[in-house]
Image (spheres, rainbow, N blue to C red):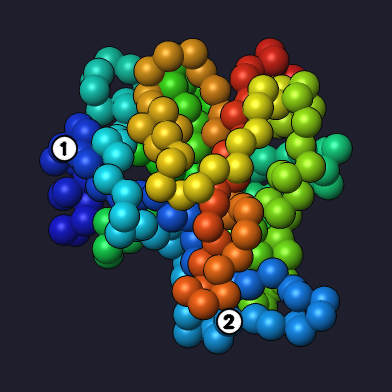
Amino acid sequence: MKAVTEVVGSLVAAFAVLVALCACGAPRDPAADVTPPAEETGNAIQQSPSAPPPAVPRRSSALEDNRAPVPPAPNRIEIPDLGIDVRVQPVGLDAQGRMGLFDDPSIAAWYQWGSAPASPAGSTVIAAHVDSLEYDLLPFARLRDAVAAMPVFVTDDAGTRHAYTVERLEITGKADVDWPAAFDRSGPPRLTLVTCGGEFDYENRRYLSNLVLTATPAGESG
């Protein structure tokens, strides 16, 4: 109940929700097959101690206008060209004030206090682990092969299949990612997909970068 109170109690708060996405398991090293211990992996989007916390929404955008209907939550994301087809479920903040992720590789997380696919504005944020000790590489690892104009589809609880096309793909050091832009609830509707990327730091058991894919609406598909 305390976490819910904090979410509803403020419109925008500065907190580190995606500054260091997922302390994921190490990628498989074909030479040494080195993976970090299970106790050193995480299931949440974690804070980078060297980066300033971004200002991101902490309550539903629908609460800003009681007259506005609550948009349906996304429940599936597909990128056929990459063989990605995973379930999507909503998440808020975990006990440490971070956006949670699911251990199960068949589930991606939608940040429910931000925009949804049917929202008239803003960024719909969906994130997932890139790999794990138990499941090895996960579907979002294939995002690195996305190219401009590649189709992306997100289906919501109303049964609407929202079509997007990839606009850009960036792999950026965790401290340099523009998280306020990723979570922005203003501006044109868009889809933001996030996972880990870049080099893995074996000493500290973390990826050094985040992969952020931005896609723009391409009309609706039934």
The answer to whether residue 188 is left or right of residue 33 is left
Q: Residue at x 55, y 68 (%)?
A: 201
- Nearer to us: label 1 or label 2: 2
Q: Which mark is residue 99?
A: none
Q: Is 126 drawn above or below residue 200 in the view shown? A: above
Tell me what residue is drawn at x 76 percent, y 84 percent.
32
Q: In the rendered view of the protein, which quadrant contains the N terminus?
A: bottom left
- The residue nearer to you, when weighing 143 against 154, is 143
Residue 119: percent from the left, percent from the top? 46, 21
- 90 or 149, which is in the foreground? 149
| 96 over 13 or under it: above or below | below
As drawn, is 124 to the left or to the right of 60? right
Residue at point 71% right, 54% down? 141
Instruction: Look at mark 1 in the image and give the residue it sits on.
Output: 10
Dot 2 surroundings within 10 Å: few (below 14), some, or many (20 or more)? Answer: some
**Residue 80: horizontal and vertical position, in percent?**
83, 38
Q: Which one is in front, 9 or 177?
A: 177
Of 4 and 188, the residue lying toward us: 188
Looking at the picture, which amino acid does disc 2 mark?
Pro
Quarter of the picture holding the C terminus: top right
Q: Type of residue at label 1? A: Ser
Badge 2 element: loop
Which badge, 1 or 2, is on the more N-terminal residue?
Answer: 1
Q: How many angstroms separate mark 1 from mark 2 (CA)? A: 37 Å
Q: Can the viewer see residue 72?
A: no
- Above/below status of 52 relative to 161: below
Q: Is residue 8 left or right of residue 150?
A: left
Label 1 with label 2: CB-CB less than 8 Å: no
Residue 36 circle label: 2
Question: Element under label 1?
Answer: loop
| Residue 209 appearing in the image | yes
